[in-house]
Every structure is written in structure tokens, then in C-alpha cells.
Amino acid sequence: MRIRDKINLDCKTPRADSLVMVAVMAFTICIDLSIGLLAGVFVAAFVYVWDSSTRVIVEREVSAEESASVTYNVTGPLFFATAAGFSDIFPIEEIQFDPDEIVILLENAEVYDYSGMVALKKVYDRFADLGKVVALSSLTPSSRRLMEKSAYMWQGVNFLEVEEVDQSVDMTASVDK
């Protein structure tokens, strides 16, 4: 029987958090409290970047109508740590066999920095170079604001605008009838 079972300790501290605590303690004891705190912040930042770099998920969905279009649903953060991995998800050897209409759905993705924008533009250009019609769809408001700051990069890129329907108006209209 483990000690954890004897004292009814059901929760387990993540290893990354334990590493941060040990780093802060070690630097505080050896050097100084301020250096220990800075070391903890740096270790926590690196752990966050490492964890986030594995969170980009791309799901491919072929339309039911004679395979006329493909929708790539992107989920996760796009920033400097995920940029290379995101670009590698779309190798030319595989995407050349996709239909001529491509939609990259960014509803559950967030673009955080210039590296994320470059990776997204690189994927867009990869499809466009193969003669495919590509459109980016459902950008989050913060991603849209960031991308508008570098509008020169997005000249000639197709964006699909999704109309937001106010559901409260529809519900009150049905109640009044």
C-alpha cells in the first residue's frame, strides 16, 4: 500500500508544478528570493509553451456532395511555439489530392502573434500554389484585430464572413405569436 492511499490523498500535483516549486525553493535557498521567483516564472513560462505546442488539432471534413470541398477545422493556439508544427500538418504530398475548394475554419483557434499569422499564411499559400480556392472562416475577434494590424500580409486572401444571428430576437418573436 502506498503512502498516498494511506492518507487518502486523491489529487496529484502535476510534475510541471512540482518542477516550478523545486526550482523556486532551490534558487531561493542558494541565491536569493527574487532570483528564485524569476526562475519560477521562467520555468512556468517554458512549461506553458511546451504544453501549448501540443494542443493544435486539425480535423479534416470532406463535404458530402461529391467531395467538392474540404473543411479543415483548426482548434488550439497559433503562436511561435506551434507555428512549425501547424505548417507541418499540411504536407504538399497529401494536400495535392484535396478537392479544389478548401475552407480553413478557425472558429476554435486563436492567433496570438506574428509567427502564428505567418504559419497560417504559409498554409494558405501552399493550397493556393496548388491551384485550389482557399478561404479562411470564422476568425475570433481578437485574431481578426491582430491580423488587421498587418493587413499587407493578407491582401488577396479570401475570408468568409459568418453572420451572427441574434437568437434572443428569434425567441421573442416566436413567443409573441
Image: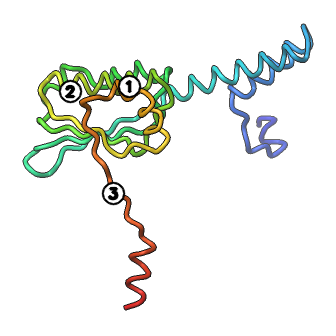
Q: Residue at point 20% right, 41% down?
A: 70
Q: Nearer the viewer, residue 151 or 177?
A: 151
The reply to whether residue 118 is in sight is yes
Residue 142 in the image: state x and y as whole percent. 50, 40
The location of residue 10, given as percent across then percent down, is: 74, 45
> Residue 86 has which mark?
1
Residue drawn at 61 percent across, 27 percent down: 48
| Location of residue 50 by image quarter | top right
Assess whether mark 1 and mark 3 are in contact (beta carbons under 8 angstroms): no
**Residue hosting label 2:** 127
What quarter of the picture does the N terminus occupy? top right
Residue at 41% in and 89% down: 176
| Sequence order check, earlier mark of 3 and 1 | 1
Q: Amino acid at mark 3?
A: Glu
Report the label total: 3
Spatial CA span between label 2 and label 1: 14 Å
Name which of mark 2 and mark 1 comes first in the sequence: 1
Circles 2 and 1, Cβ within 8 Å, touching? The answer is no
Left or right, residue 117 beside residue 48: left
Whether residue 60 can be seen here: no
As displayed, is residue 75 above or below residue 91? below
Tag 2: amino acid: Phe
View extreme (top): residue: 31
Residue 45, image x, y percentages: 66, 23
The numbered dot on residue 163 is 3
- Distance from disc 3 to disc 2, alpha carbons, whole Å, reads 25 Å
Q: Secondary structure at mark 2?
A: helix
Q: Is residue 142 above or below residue 14?
A: below
Ranked by sequence position, the earlier of labels 3 and 2 is: 2
Quarter occupied by residue 72: top left
